[in-house]
Amino acid sequence: MLEHIPKDFINFILVLVFSLLIGLEQRRRHFKDKRGSLYGTDRTHVFIGLLGFVLYLIAPNNLFLFAGGGLAIVLFLSIFYWKKIENRDQYGITSMIVVLITYSLTPLIYLKPLWLTVSLVTVVLVFTELKQFLWKLSSRFDENEFITLAKFLLISGIILPMLPHKVIDAYVPVSPFDIWLAVVIISAISYASYLIQKFLFPNKGILITGILGGSYSSTATTVVLARRSKTEGANMLQITSATMMATAVMFIRLLVLTFIFNTALAYKLTVPFVSLSLLSVLLSWLILKFGKRQKAMDFKQIKIKNPLEFKTALLFAVLFVVFALLTKVVMQHYGNKGLDILSFVVGVTDITPFLLGLFTGKYGLPIVVLSQATLIAATSNNLIKLIYALFLGSRELRKPLIIGFSVIIAASVIFIVV
């Protein structure tokens, strides 16, 4: 049916609709402003959009008329802006920029795919409504935020592309690019958790603390929560539930890393890790649902330090190389059983560098062996987290934590054996 409608007529309707939408949004956004403080609203934007349509259609191959119309609008806008400053002492130019965007709709519709025009109009409508939100968001930035962002761009956009892809050595079967890529991926996850905590959930309770902390470091989160249990008025059920949630997020984080670096292994680990994550969430919910009712406690988020410190990145890179070398030596002298023992021993430390070495290293190991080593390391890490919590936490915390972690560890052992 649409093929029988002239293209110019369809584009005319599109220009009319898009111009009207932008104009209506401008009227709604500035409904309470004094008369004369805007360079037109709904009707003005429609006429400006139609002017652009007419001048473009008259000479589509020669844009002198369209450019002349644009210059005339710029002249009127300049006069208006000058008077606006003179009479009202207002310097904002957002509404005038929106006018120029409205005028430019016609060539965009004719020359580019429709989705691009729709995207542009959507961005205009959304961002003009986000003024207050952006003001509040920018107020949370401090002087270090853009330095932190610059560091991330440095390690990901400058250092990473410069590194060679050649394997370092037979005993370290990974390239400098692989090592630094692992640093970039871990830094990106930590940075995302940092931004979410700071700007979206600056102080939203203990359960959110567990979730965000698990995306950063479930071990550190468990330690902080256990220590918090010794404070007066601490809610043991909430702390245990948040600890279980941190563990649930840990399984998902490891699965995401596996998909990034070793897709075949990721498919093998999907069922175990997703099952263990869901089991942890279920335990978290059951602890809150059927435990003794306690007064809810206030809890500030774990203060994550700058996740893009170069010392941290370099330490991670060094650990990555050390574990890669250690894995190669163990595999040569002790085989698969030695790798299983190493995976269990590594669980007492940060397992991420070790696991990423397994995911990216060219060891020639079967997927089954890699999968078992990964599950053993995660299980060992959960065991050490339980030990940390029992040692650092209050006595009332011990029973629910032992029950929760015992169920997770037992389920993990089943996946390892099966």
Image: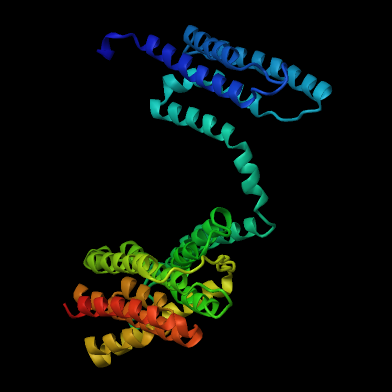
Left/right placement of residue 82 relative to residue 323 reads right
Residue situated furthest left in the rendering: 418
Q: Quadrant of residue 417?
A: bottom left
Residue 135 vs residue 200: left or right?
right
- Quarter of the image for the N terminus: give it: top left
Residue at 67% from the left image edge and 18% from the top image edge: 39
The reply to whether residue 324 is visible in this rendering is: no
Q: Residue at x 57, y 54 (%)?
A: 199
- Relative to residue 70, is residue 275 depicted above or below? below
**Which of the 4 image quarters holds residue 131?**
top right
Q: Quadrant of the C terminus?
A: bottom left
Q: Residue at x 50, y 85 (%)?
A: 392
**Colouring used for the render:** rainbow
Q: Front-most of 335 and 235?
A: 235
Q: Nearer the viewer, residue 16 or 29?
A: 29
Residue 248 position in % (x across, y down): 36, 67
Residue 414, relative to residue 36: is it above or below? below
Q: Is residue 334 left or right of residue 192?
A: left
Q: Position of residue 405 (x, y in %)?
A: 34, 78
x 47%, y 23%: residue: 108
Residue 6 lies, in percent from the top left, at 34, 8
How many numbered circles are shown? 0
Q: Is residue 98 above or below residue 365?
A: above
Q: Does any portion of residue 376 appear in the rendered image?
A: yes
| Residue situated furthest front in the rendering | 293
Q: Residue furthest right?
A: 86
Towards the viewer: 271 or 148: 271
Q: Residue 51 in the image: state x and y as whole percent.
A: 55, 10
